[in-house]
Amino acid sequence: MLQAQRLLSPAYRTTIMVSAIFFAAGFTLASQSPSIPALATILQADPAEIGGMFSTFSIGIIAVQFLLTPLSRRVGMRNTLLLCVLLMGLSFILIGQGINLTILFTAALLSGFGFGGILSLGNRLVAALFPRGSAAALNGVNVFFSVGSILGPVLASMLSKQFNAPQYALGIGGLLMCCFALLMPFTVPNIREQEASTQPSQQTEGAPPTFNTWLVSLMLLLYIGAEIGFSAWITLYMINSAAMADANAALVTASFWVALTAGRILATLLGLRLSTQQLLLLSISGLVLSSIVLISSVGNIPFSVLGVLLFGLSCGPVFPTGIALVASNSRATAQVMVIANCGGLILPALFGFVLTYQGPLMMQLLVGLTTLTMLVVGIITMRPAKRLSQSLSHD
């Protein structure tokens, strides 16, 4: 009886709803990679041109961070999150239509506004609800993003085989997000930003960001650029490097998200045993190792797939665990979100350009350089990271 009451509490209802929204967001975003070749054909554009939507998407993610706090103070965090979910859902329904490049980039910008709000508000709400195990809780909620990211490319592959239209998965994901948005008023209490700061996590506006916060921001900037860029181009990479059929290449993209999901599940367990810093360093080291496998196996299907799986497994814990370092301080969280998402402005489009015009090997060398730089920044960050998390919790 007590367990049932606990599950029906506002905290758990909110967590379930955030998990569902993350699932739909992951489903929709991961459907982009298999859809790029089809959208390029429909719009008569180079794949690298279509890849420009990742930059406009990231601009939206960054810009919305400056609006979230004043808006959530005025209309409440739930209503702000609801607007973001609707905006992202409707935008991806438009993207899936493949009308023209102007509408594609405009919708990508608006979807970035939506996803930026979902990412920031969703993670902050969960961190506030589970203060004593925020790293484990955030990894757990983000598992649902990963599960959606698996099913999106799988459905896109099926649509490609049956109708030669993988982009329909984008519209289906957008429709799912709109449905979840309509359920929010009945499941999530509407608290304002000031009320969230009084939750058990003691989430505060905090002091001005420290040098250590900048290091975390830079580390996650490199990570977001690498994850979005790598996952966005897996389908085309496998087609170009190994002459793989489109539908099969889409399944390799799905396998990346399977591995990433496994990484987040594993991180949820390891987060109870390892420190946040240890978990981060272990994950980033895995990214470097998987990059070496990918560089040495261009054109070799079995080892390329192995590299993709290792890369996904290592990606799993990085973002939610990095956010856990600063989640107790809303000001630091906002800074990290803004700077980290700048990685999505440049790297995904750059990966696509290099893949299209320089070839698969050069793309993997660029991915490897990114992960190696991330490891160097991560090692520097780990030295003062303990003091960072302690200072943020006392600011």
Image (cartoon, rainbow, N blue to C red):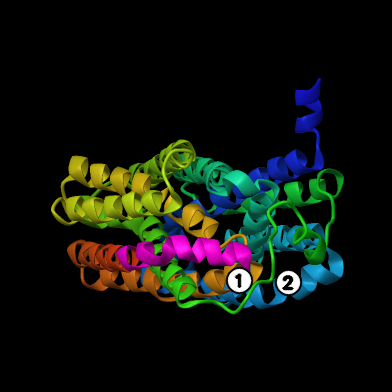
> What residue do we see at 40% from left, 59% from top?
227
Q: Is residue 322 left or right of residue 237?
A: right
Q: Write down the residue under mark 2.
A: 69
| Residue situated in front as seen by the camera: 223 or 51 | 223
Is residue 298 shown to the viewer in this render?
yes
Which corner quadrant of the image does residue 6 belong to? top right
Instruction: Pick whichever of labels 1 and 2 is earlier in the sequence.
Output: 2
Is residue 46 shown to the viewer in this render?
no
Disc 2 marks which amino acid?
A: Thr
Residue 212 percent coordinates (x, y): 45, 72
Distance Cα–Cα, label 1 vs label 2:
9 Å
Residue bounds of the magenta highlight: 379-395
The secondary structure making up most of the magenta span is helix
Disc 1 marks which amino acid?
A: Ala
Residue 334 is labelled as 1
Residue 198 percent coordinates (x, y): 78, 59
**Residue 315 among magenta residues:** no
